[in-house]
Image (cartoon, rainbow, N blue to C red):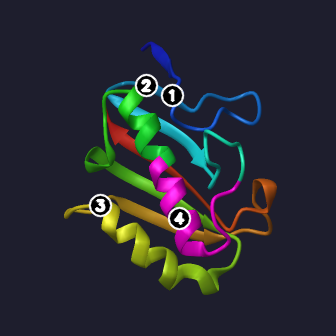
Amino acid sequence: MSKTKIQADAAPAALGPYSQAIAAGGFIYCSGQIPIDPKTGQFVGASIEAQTHQVLKNLQAVLAAAGSDLGKAVKTTVFLADMNDFAAMNGVYQTYFADPAPARSTVQVARLPRDARVEIEVVCLA
């Protein structure tokens, strides 16, 4: 099985030695995105809602570069700095996914890159 690196100029560049996404075996595996504006390199908003919107916009850009979209998502993982943000994050999250929504795990973590409040990764059909 081969794998192909996905690089989207409309999403933030990787912050380390990893790819924004990899296409392999009929799937697109997206690395976690945090709420960075790809044009400025700065965080978008302080609220969990604003950050969640930017994270999902970044994922949309990566998936578009791969020829896919959030409608083909089969699994997401949401990382929250504070589980008290769950309801607000979920309110934004649900506007990006039609039924049937992808399988999902949501966990609270000790810390996220650049002290983001939310990070989301996704696996989609190619």
Q: Nearer the viewer, mark 1 or mark 2?
A: 1
Percent from the top left, x then y, of residue 82?
Answer: 69, 79
Q: Identify the element where label 2 is drawn.
A: strand
CB contact under 8 Å: marks 3 and 4: no
Q: Identify the element where label 1 is drawn.
A: loop
Percent from the top left, x then y, of residue 117?
Answer: 68, 68
Q: Amino acid at mark 2?
A: Ala
Question: Image point 65% across, 50% down: which residue?
Answer: 36
Figure check: 58 above or below 1: below
Nearest to N terminus: mark 4 or mark 1: 1
Nearest to N terminus: mark 4 or mark 2: 2
- Main SS type for the magenta part? helix
Cα gap from disc 1 to disc 2, whole angstroms = 13 Å
Q: What is the span of residues highlighted in magenta in the rendered image? A: 43-57
Q: Would you say 68 lies left or right of 6 here?
A: left
Number of residues whose C-alpha sits closer than 10 Å to that of mark 4, classed few (under 14), some (14–19) or many (20 or more): many
Q: Which residue is mark 1?
A: 8
Q: Would you say 36 lies left or right of 91 here?
A: right
Number of residues whose C-alpha sits closer than 10 Å to that of mark 2, classed few (under 14), some (14–19) or many (20 or more): some
Q: Which residue is mark 4?
A: 52
Q: Amino acid at mark 1?
A: Ala
Residue 97 badge: 3
Q: Amino acid at mark 4?
A: Thr
Check the image and name the residue furthest to the top. Answer: 2
Cα gap from disc 4 to disc 1, whole angstroms = 19 Å
Examine the structure image and report whether residue 96 is included in the region drawn in magenta: no
Residue 23 badge: 2
Q: Identify the element where label 3 is drawn.
A: loop
Cα gap from disc 1 to disc 3, whole angstroms = 21 Å
